[in-house]
Image: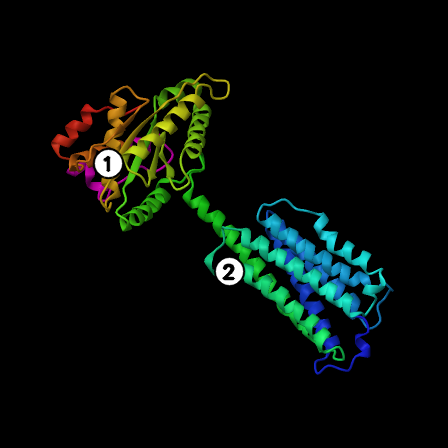
Amino acid sequence: MFAAAAELPPSPLDVPTLSFVAVCISAVLGLMLIFAWFQERNSRALAWWGAAYLIGASSMALWSAPSPLFALPPEVPAALIFVACGMIWNGVRLFHGRPVMPIMNFFGAIVWLSLCQFPLLAEGSRARIIFGALVVATYTFLIALELGRERRKALHSGAATVLVPILHATIFLVPLAMKTWFPASADWLAVFALETMLYAVGTAIIVLLMVKDYHLHIYRNAAATDELTGLLNRRAFLESALRLCAHQAKGSQPLTILLFDLDRFKAINDRYGHPVGDEVLRLFAKVARASMRANDIIARFGGEEFAAIVPSGPGDATKIANRVRLSFEAAAVTVGTHPIGATVSVGAATGSSPVTDIDALIARADAALYQAKREGRNRVCVAEESPVTAGARLIAAARAGHVAERGSLPARKPRGHAAAAILVPPAAEAATARLPYRH
């Protein structure tokens, strides 16, 4: 691809020196990515990228060396460049959880080696240079396409991961234009060497940013997710609920809180053991995710209690709650080899005006949930539109404390909960005593 460069007039830039520097930078960056893979063995894409850098450095060393140690066909160095491009592309796919296509590692190289046997792509010809540049540019645009398909990227690196490969593919075509318009100049080789160095460094930075963003995403998910069910935990649910409340308030749209409590869950644990109880919880989480819409938010609040917030009024919310209830009843007839027959009770409360107090809405849903329990379980009850009383809030807080004692997650604690035991009015305390813990 770069043969006969010595026959061209000298360039203002020292091409052999630039080529040597490009080889060294690519090799060092390749080793750096390999060492990063040794530290992060779960990121196998780092090994692919590191190997691609080393192959690219070897290719540049072969075609730029003034006296190579062994003779190779002139098509081989460029073929190795295409292999490196294919490995980077597959590394991006692997990093984003997509299947690797090994044939693409060698597709460009195979096409290159085959077509170079024809006189049209003779060594040093303009057609060979054009074809080689187009192959690299195509691979690089494909890399940008793979990066653009990934939705989970941080704001500070999301645009860069797409723009840098596109910019590289565009700049890589500059030597092609220079060779076409200024065939008597060797400046295009200098431009190629400079562009290779810049892109090698830029791509390595982008790769490390991607890996950092990936681990940050993992840590954030771990902090916001219930380990047993994979749903949001209480803290993440409340944060998401507040954002949804603000969004619904802009258009004066209603939203509804749904509280789910598995019926007689303690009896299931006592009879079949906690491992089976855990399977029932995971089953409910799976059914709830499958039965709810993409914009509905669901979480595990603690123990056998789950919560969801849906951007709908009481009519649609009741349909969603019944869909979850009926689906779970059908799915939980048998869990594993055990005839469980689990069911769930649901309490719903809708905020029609802009919701500013999510705790009050949760308290109303909690009261509706207890009504469902009192009326026989395995049903949906909707709270009235009347505002919640202070006593109802205290009762809900006291019951949430029972959930915390029985579950593995913290209970809902309204502001000032530490003093709630002292401040409970006699009427509220009596009401709490009259309503036994739901099960």
Dot 1 or dot 2, earlier in sequence: 2
Q: Is residue 271 shown above or below 194?
A: above
Residue 404 belongs to magenta span: yes
Residue at 41% across, 44% down? 224
The picture places residue 108, in percent across and down from the top left corner, at 73, 55
Q: In the figure, residue 65 lies in which quadrant?
A: bottom right
Q: In the drawing, does residue 217 fall left or right of residue 202?
A: left
Asked if one can make out residue 326 in the rendered structure from this viewpoint, the answer is: yes
In the image, which residues are magenta?
402-423
Residue 308 belongs to magenta span: no
The picture places residue 115, in percent across and down from the top left corner, at 80, 58
Residue at 74% across, 52% down? 106
Q: Secondary structure at mark 1?
A: helix
Using the numbered discs, state the Cα–Cα distance from disc 1 to disc 2 in whole angstroms: 43 Å
Residue type, numbered disc 1:
Ala
Residue at 50% across, 21% down? 336
Label 2: which residue? 159
Choose between 364 and 34: the one closer to the eye: 364
Circle 2 crowding by C-alpha within 10 Å: few under 14, some 14–19, many from 20: few
Q: Which mark is residue 363?
A: 1
Q: Which mark is residue 25?
A: none
